[in-house]
Image (spheres, helix red, strand yellow):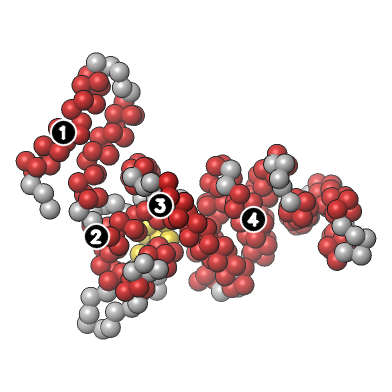
Amino acid sequence: KISCEAFLARLHKDGQEYFAQVEKGKKGKVRHGEKCLGITLRPTLEQLRDEERLVLEYAALLPADHVPLPWLRALVSKEFPECGQDAEIGLSDPWLDVVRRLLSLRLLQETGVLDSAGNPLVVRMHRLVGDVVRHGLDKGRLEQRKELLDELTVERTNFLGENWLRAENRWELTPLVTMADLGMDKGDPLATDLVLALSSTLFSIGQYRIVRRLLACCLNVLVQSPESDHTDLALAHNNLGEVERALGNFPEAREHVEQALAILERSLEPSHPNLGTAHNSL
């Protein structure tokens, strides 16, 4: 903890030059607000323990309104194994202690999504807080965090694909779909793979319009990318055709399946099983 005097001194030191520019009209209001937040947060962030700071670093890479705490726990436990172990009855739980502290500091906020024990399952992080945390990471550390998060995302997508029948597992769909949306907006190569994997699960539970929107965006990305795999492009067309068929849009469904078939006929041997799948869809 720091005293009020020390905090004000820090604000003055970090912001004196910036505030002078604001007064002269050289800085805009939004930029001013972001700068103020960065200056205000820095002393708080510097007081965090390593595991608490690591939680925020991963949270800053996730959708701001859909931050799954079990994902953060799995990632942080790689460096701090004690956070991955449930405490014995009567003892303090290291992971819950971390979560409660970050919630008490308002660095994370509850969303009302709870697990069976009544503990927060999904939280949110203010977008500007996420910006401050990300900007504090060097390139190497940021890439490392992103790589581990990508691996976990693929793992959770595969898990959901195999276990979607259990309704209690489906809460992960929302953060995964949001990650896919953000990834496509940012041109993340993982995003199209994520959409193609999620489309089967979403189709199975009847979320046709969500699947159609995701696959349409995915197709747009794949068509514009010269490095796109023909198999992915054909799969996206085929899956979108299945969705349009389920919605009763048969001309659109036929068009997409025919495009999938044409792509596969140009790139595969006549006896390849994927051609059989496309013919069956048609």
- For disc 3, the marked residue is 141
**Precedes in sequence: disc 4 or disc 2:** 2
Q: Amino acid at mark 2?
A: Arg
What distance separates the C-alpha of mark 1 from that of mark 4? Answer: 47 Å
Chain-order first, disc 4 or disc 3 = 3
Closer to the chain start, of discs 1 and 2, is 1
Q: Secondary structure at mark 3?
A: helix
The percent position of residue 194, horizontal first and vertical second, equals 61, 56
Residue occupying the point 24% across, 44% down: 41
Q: Which residue is mark 4?
A: 193
Mark 1 or mark 4, whichever is nearer to me:
1
Is 177 or 11 nearer to us in this picture?
A: 11
On the question of residue 191 being in view, the answer is yes
Label 3: few (<14), some (14–19) or many (≥20) C-alpha neighbours in 10 Å = few
Rounded to the nearest angstrom, the CA distance separating label 4 from label 3 is: 24 Å
Sequence order check, earlier mark of 2 and 3? 2
| Mark 2 → mark 3, Cα distance in angstroms | 17 Å
Calculate the distance from the C-alpha at mark 3 to the C-alpha at mark 1.
27 Å
Q: Residue at x 67, y 43 (%)?
A: 221
Q: Kindly state the secondary structure of the residue where label 2 is placed.
A: loop
Type of the residue with mark 4: Asp
Q: Are marks 2 and 3 in contact (CB under 8 Å)?
A: no
Q: Position of residue 256 (x, y in %)?
A: 81, 49
- The quadrant holding residue 70 is bottom left
Viewer-side residue, 46 vs 180: 46
Instruction: Answer with left or right where residue 52 lies relative to residue 4.
Output: right
Disc 4 is placed on an element classified as: helix
Sequence-first tag of 1 and 4: 1
Q: Can you say whether 249 is above or below 33 in the image? A: below
The residue type indicated by label 1 comes to Lys
SS assignment at label 1: helix
